[in-house]
Image: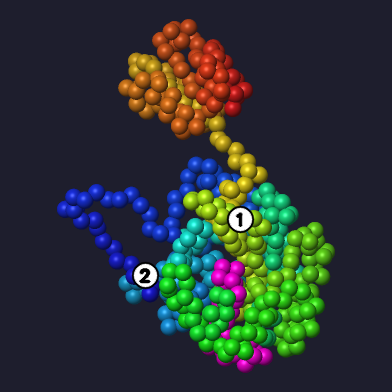
Amino acid sequence: MAVRFCPGVPNMTDKKKLIPSLPKGFKDRWGQELALKKKLIKIIEANFLKYGFIPLETSPMEITKNIGSFLADDESNPMSDVFTFEDDKESLTLRYDMSAPLARFVAQNFRDLAFPYKRYTYGDVFRREKPDNSRFRSFMQFDADIIGNVNEAQADAEICNIIADTFFNCGLKKDQFSVNVSNRKIVQGLISELKISEEQEFKVIRAIDKLERIGLNGVEDLLKKERRDSSGAITKGANLSDDQASQIIEFLKIKDLKELKSKLTNPISLEGIKEIEELFEILSKGKFVNQVKTNFTIVRGLAYYSGFCVETNLNFKGKNAQGKEIEIGSVASGGRYNSLIKRFKGADYKGTGMSIGVDRLVFALNQLDQIKVETTDSVLVCILDEKYISEYYKIVNELRENNINSEIYLDPSKNLKKQLTYADKKGCSLAIICGQEEFENNKLTIKKLKSSKENDQLQITKDNLINEIKKLI
């Protein structure tokens, strides 16, 4: 059921203390993890700009009927997987991806855009998923899309190239990830050949899309009557016959393009195979073709995908908070959507694109010791004698004027030991210590907080402060 927004205020008469906790599926990020995330955002953005994509920022909330219901498993409740709010007479939905808002934006502004329109964007998306160690209800996506009636093989190849190039720039090695591609038409041709009804088709697609998570047996259950997961929850299946389900399972075992061509004769499937071949022909003209592999089980779960599909998987496992090894899943995925914008009056453009799951990528890369995050050096000005407070502020002001990250300790009543403990816990690089004797002699003491030596400090003249600090940070 969609969430209904009900504003309220805390019960001020309730004496019980609140428990500081987050709802399941959401996460705070700070320290090393947040520093890594910010570094990756800078790397990804720089690479997207290099490929000629331009930035766009769209609202995190859309009119519900505009955003559509492409995510839901439950046909009887199409908004079950999103957060929907009632606001006066308008129904609003938090975006569940960046493609639906892009479609609305292009349809709204197509007269002012240069086509092909190549845009990138990043921000949080929201889904009412069942959360686990690597799946969240709110997570950041970084998207690149190409909108316009262009050569599809070229545009789709550009998406593959930018994924591979970006991941290399993020510090991954060639054996640590694979860009896996397929074409949704291949399985749609098989579905047509098996005379699977239109009502069943989407459930079949969604079942196949879950292969990586639930395995062949789980997919087979979803193709038939129902699947019961480890918690006992039941998901209704597509109600295929045993023969229909068996043929789809056999298709999912095919790994080779030649074998695929020999076994599938449906014109729709052959069209999808031809598009894969054309994609690799273009990829061969670039430098990342060896990073791209075929995987015919990729169909993409969102209903608006129409052909080319891509999923990027890491070739290593991660560890959850309990130290247990887990599969990380896809960290960049997308595909072609040729009818998404056509829903809106006045615009009809083909589209292709991909999303990098930034938070999942952070989770994965945080497990490796390959990517170094530069820490920001900062200086703490300690207060030893409150009567010199003006002098301490002169010091911190001079540091800041010279673009040196610095702060003054905000409680003069605390002794030096507590001030240095604060600096150490916060990760400051240096502390400036200055009492009456130093001020009278126009000197300052700089203490190196990250040094392993016990008395690693030096005394300098006050006039030489900036030069000495810049040598140390």
- Asked whether 111 or 227 is in front, the reply is 227
Circle on res. 52? none
Tell me what residue is drawn at x 56 percent, y 23 percent: 452
Sequence-earlier tag: 2 or 1: 2
Residue 23, horizontal then vertical, whole percent:
38, 58
Residue span colored magenta: 191-216
- Asked whether 335 or 364 is in front, the reply is 364
Res. 451 image quadrant: top right
Q: Is residue 2 magenta?
A: no
Q: Is residue 365 left or right of residue 75?
A: right
Q: Secondary structure at mark 1?
A: loop
The answer to whether one can see residue 337 in this image is no
Q: Residues within 10 Å of mark 2 (few under 14, many from 20)?
A: some
The quarter of the image holding the N terminus is bottom left
Q: Amino acid at mark 2?
A: Val
Q: Is residue 194 magenta?
A: yes
Residue at mark 1: 317
- Label 2 and label 1: CA atoms lie apart by 34 Å
Q: Is residue 72 left or right of residue 336?
A: left
The quarter of the image holding the C terminus is top right
**422 over 18 or under it: above or below:** above
Tell me what residue is drawn at x 51 percent, y 74 percent: 71
Residue 70, horizontal then vertical, whole percent:
52, 76
**256 over 430 or under it: above or below:** below
Res. 153 image quadrant: bottom right
Residue at mark 2: 3
Foreground mark, 2 or 1? Answer: 1
| Residue furthest to the left | 13
Residue 358, horizontal then vertical, whole percent:
57, 56
Residue 238, horizontal then vertical, whole percent:
53, 85
